[in-house]
Image: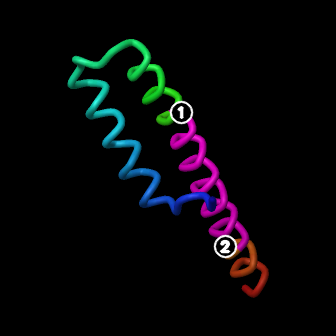
């Protein structure tokens, strides 16, 4: 199973948060959702770190050309 893209992970994370905030879940369901949310947050962090690195590389290349 491949890792979801940033937008997909972000949207799923938002849905997980909404379910947790709505309440009414069993402890087990809440823990399962919490774990999924943590995993999705890490995926989002990895995507953002990769994007940040690409921007920094492009900026450094542009500065080197000047």
Mark sitting earlier along the chain (2/1): 1
Q: Secondary structure at mark 1?
A: helix
Residue 55 belongs to magenta span? yes
State which quadrant residue 22 falls in.
Answer: top left
Q: Residue furthest bottom?
A: 65
State which quarter of the image contains the N terminus: bottom right
Residue linked to disc 1? 38
- Judging by the rendered image, the residue that carries numbered circle 2 is 59
In the rendered image of this protein, does residue 18 appear above or below residue 54?
above
Q: Residue at x 24, y 19 (%)?
A: 23
What label does residue 49 carry, if any?
Answer: none
Q: Is residue 58 left or right of residue 32?
A: right
Q: Nearer the viewer, mark 2 or mark 1?
A: 1
Left/right of residue 2 with respect to residue 29 in the rendered view: right
Residue 26 in the figure: left or right of residue 38 = left
Which residue in the rendered view is the most extreme toward the top? 27
Query: Would residue 56 appear left or right of 28 to someone viewing this image?
Result: right
Q: Which residues are magenta?
A: 38-57
Few, some or many residues within 10 Å of mark 2 (<14, 14–19, 20+): few
The spot of residue 63 in percent (x, y) is: 72, 77
- Give the quadrant of the C terminus: bottom right
Height in image: 4 above or below 60? above
């Amino acid at each position: 199973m491949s890792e979801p893209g940033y937008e997909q992970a972000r949207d799923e994370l938002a849905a997980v948060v909404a379910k947790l905030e709505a309440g009414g879940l069993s402890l087990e369901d809440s823990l399962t959702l919490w774990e999924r949310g943590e995993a999705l947050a890490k995926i989002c962090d990895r995507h953002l770190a990769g994007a940040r690195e690409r921007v920094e590389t492009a900026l450094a290349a542009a500065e080197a050309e000047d």
